[in-house]
Amino acid sequence: MFLNNADSRFEDLFYSAVMLNTDMTYKTLRDLKENLVISNYRELHEKGLLNAIAKGEYKIRPETQLKIKKLLDSYGDLEKIANKYRQIALSNNIGVVSVQDKFYPYNWKNLSGMPQVFYCRGDYSLIDAMTLRGAVAVVGSRSPSRYAQYATDQICKELGNKGVTIVSGMAYGIDRQAHISSVNTKGGTIAVLAGGADNIYPPKNKDIYDQISRNGLIISEMPPGQLPLRQYFPSRNRLIAGLTDCTLVMEAGSVSGTLHTASFAANQGKEVFVLPNNIYYENAKGGLKLLEDGGNVLLGADNVIDSVARAVMYKRMALGCPGEVFFQDDKEDFEGQNDIEIIRELAKVKPEVISDEQWKILIRDALSLKPLCADELCVITMLPFYKVSKLLTELELNGTVCQEKGKYSLTFV
Amino acid sequence: MASKPNVARLFSCFATGTEVVDTVIEVSIAPGIPTFSVIGLCDSSIREAQGRLVSAFKSTGFTMPKGHITIGISPAYMRKTGTGFDLPMALGILFASGQLYLPQDARIYAEGELALNGEVKATPGACIRLKSVQKNPYLDYKIIPKSESASAGVAGFKGQSIDTLSELSEIFDGNQYKEAEFEFDLKDSNEDFLDISALKGQEKTKRALLISAAGFHNILLLGSPGSGKTMCGKILEGILPPLSRNELADVYSMNELVQGELSQLNYERPVRYVGPSITVGKLLGNAVNITPGEMALANHGILFADELPLYKQEVLDFLRGPLEERKVHLMKKGNLYSFDSSFIFLGTGNPCKCGLMYEAGSKCRCSEAEKIRYLSKISGPFLERIDIVSEMRSVKGEDLASIYIDKYKGESREYRKIVKRCWQTAHDRYGGDLLNGTFPEGDIRDSMRVTEKAVKFASELSEKGFFSARGFTRILRVARTIADINEAPDVTADEISEAAQFRMRGV
């Protein structure tokens, strides 16, 4: 799916301009929301409402009123800035996604403090694929050892081929390797940038930036044109951790941004895997320290897949409440994946309307991550065994699924 | 006034295995130096009767007549054994010597062993014999030992029982013969089975057990140690309906042969547990005195074979026949004796040497060659006799907790209702006591109502290597049972596809 909607999203752009160029804070916004002055951030663009707030028609804290007054003073300038954003976005094919959108990433929806508006460039359907098949953050040093680089290459390729999306920050070293190894796999790759989505940083990574914007997805919290400032990086790391189901620390020195990502992930209740390394190697001290603190040892892609599979399964179980999650359905390039998420939701609410073909799609999808036995398939699809067994025989007959050691797996033919 | 015939004629019978041979016992007493001979290929247990008779007569006030006593037991060409002829022989002597009055043209059936003090005792195989005797309408007097009452009750036998020889005079001289049915002590059915809800999260196995019970299909469970395989025997017992009256007689008669008279009976289906140390002889039974082995004892019930891959090869090879034919045969001196052995064969085993092959996260350390070697014993021809194969995995912690916390017992009862309904459907369809699993081999497509399309679908599966030619009819049978469970009149491709999931393919 390709988003080029900057034209119709002026309120979102305006909001970004406000947050970046005035001293407006989340606290102020919360105050306005709690006092029922505005219902969502988009109403900041309504001049009439702002005037009314400035005149003191609502009961709010005086600081908030002051800030709104300041905002009103610079209203014209902000609109100009927002217009500038719009032009850059349009000329660079950058899309705007708001928390109000149904296709806002599911993983972010469940966390607090995730951006209200973000910008993206590339194939947005990766976000849906990621929700369904899981995503892994791969982070590490900018000047890694050959060992860490080799391991990154191997593990990212393996995970990518299994359909897991690799998310990283497009920095030098491990990040770069992770993107290169996964951009052409089934899972694909997502880069989260600290500056605007059009801003290639570091500039030498232009080659992979081009590749990702063609085959992968580039995401940024910052409006188009914004330079990546030093203070934006920790926030970017938080987004990476939030977007994924677990985090792999390939190599980290004792003082490193990588450790931020890991601690964000741990705080969000996600598993952190650390590649074990030589204890005399200075640049790996941070990672080893994480292991001492209870990180998981990364022994291969299998550990990671188990963890991701668990997370994905819980996510799928959470889809029990209809309306909470929405997935895009226009992914022509995903064979057989059409409407899959809608089917899934329907399966929870009204299983009787689902046809056998649609159940088969669900079973294939469940098997795409790892082989499962019939009992596990019953749990995932919430179907009785006789139904599952019938579908499995038919899938086996047409060669999509094979059985070995009591487990069913996809044959990939 | 007692009439004194030259020859007294009585009826009795003997049983080898389940085969009952009616016999006629003739006693003649001729004047002369006292002799006692029993003729008609009798073994020493019958010939020794002289001692018991003399002593028993003396204890109860009768006397052994003087003269040539010749006792002929026919058919004379058959070898006979057993002490059950004591009572008819005694009666014959008493009639022939005029000590008891033989009513005109009376046909008298008698059986029982005599003790030296004149007591009449039971002999093994009573249930089988009495069941056959009851079918004979021409007998006027039927006298059995009192200790055979339970067998007589189960067999539906009508007659009179006696405790000692002295009671005979009341019956014949006092003319007090009263024919009555026998009652037996029926214990309440044991409801203490394991509920099927204990198989939490093992949907395939639950379904497999239901199908197995509903169609009397043989079943094999492969799974890791501690996954609850052994438990499944108890569970399967709980979802099978209780024995019918006829079946109770069959089951009881086998038990009676092995253990003698039982005081208490119930309608529970037998479950015979056998382990890897079992031998062919134990399974088959004793060929010398023709007593049933584990297979015949499991008739109408379950033969539970634990740790099947550890069995001796000869045992597994032997099992194939009875599983197919649902009968076991014993050979003795050129005669073939058969026992019915129509049971659900429930085999369990580890899927590989360490048993962890099906566990999550590749914990199994067996090499490929080892795995193949381990299962090769039960694969191939043996597996063709198994209708259903299911895998089991160890139970997850949270499920384990809920098994012990929820004491819900209703699920097995619901399953039993379904099973009962399926049995009724099958009986209506085939007539008689046949079920989908026990229906004789042959072209079963019409009798099982398999649609043309379903047969085509099944042959397509067969071509793709899902199962072999023999597996083909197995699949149709299992599919028929699934259709019965779903209350569908015809077997369609849907049922075939489900049935195919219960075949084991390769290692």
Image: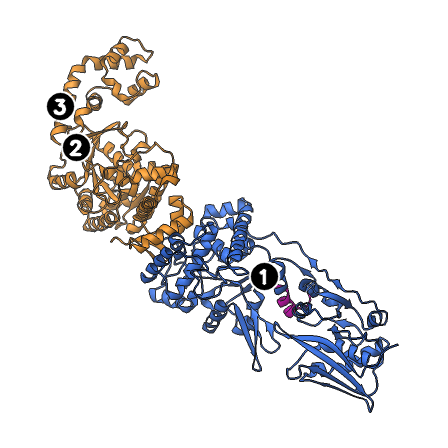
Chain colours: A orange, B blue
- Residue holding disc 3: A84
Query: On the picture, is A123 further left or further right than B411?
Result: left
Label 1 vs label 3, nearer the camera: 1
Marks 3 and 2 sit apart, C-alpha to C-alpha, by 14 Å
- Residue holding disc 2: A197
Query: On the picture, is A28 further left or further right than B324?
Result: left
What kind of secondary structure does the magenta stretch mostly adopt?
helix
Image location (x, y in percent) of residue B61: 86, 76
**Does the magenta portion include B258?**
yes
Marks 1 and 2 sit apart, C-alpha to C-alpha, by 75 Å
Image location (x, y in percent) of residue B397: 46, 48
With respect to residue A209, does B319 lie above or below?
Answer: below
Which chain contains the residue that carries disc 2? Answer: A
Say if labels 1 and 2 share a chain.
no
With respect to residue B232, does A184 lie above or below?
Answer: above
At mark 3, the secondary structure is helix
Which chain contains the residue that carries disc 3? Answer: A
Between B463 and A36, the one lying in front of the other is B463
Image location (x, y in percent) of residue B499: 41, 56
**Does the magenta portion include B298?**
no
Label 1 vs label 2, nearer the camera: 1
Labels 3 and 2: the sequence-earlier one:
3
- Write the start and end of the magenta stretch as one range: B251-261
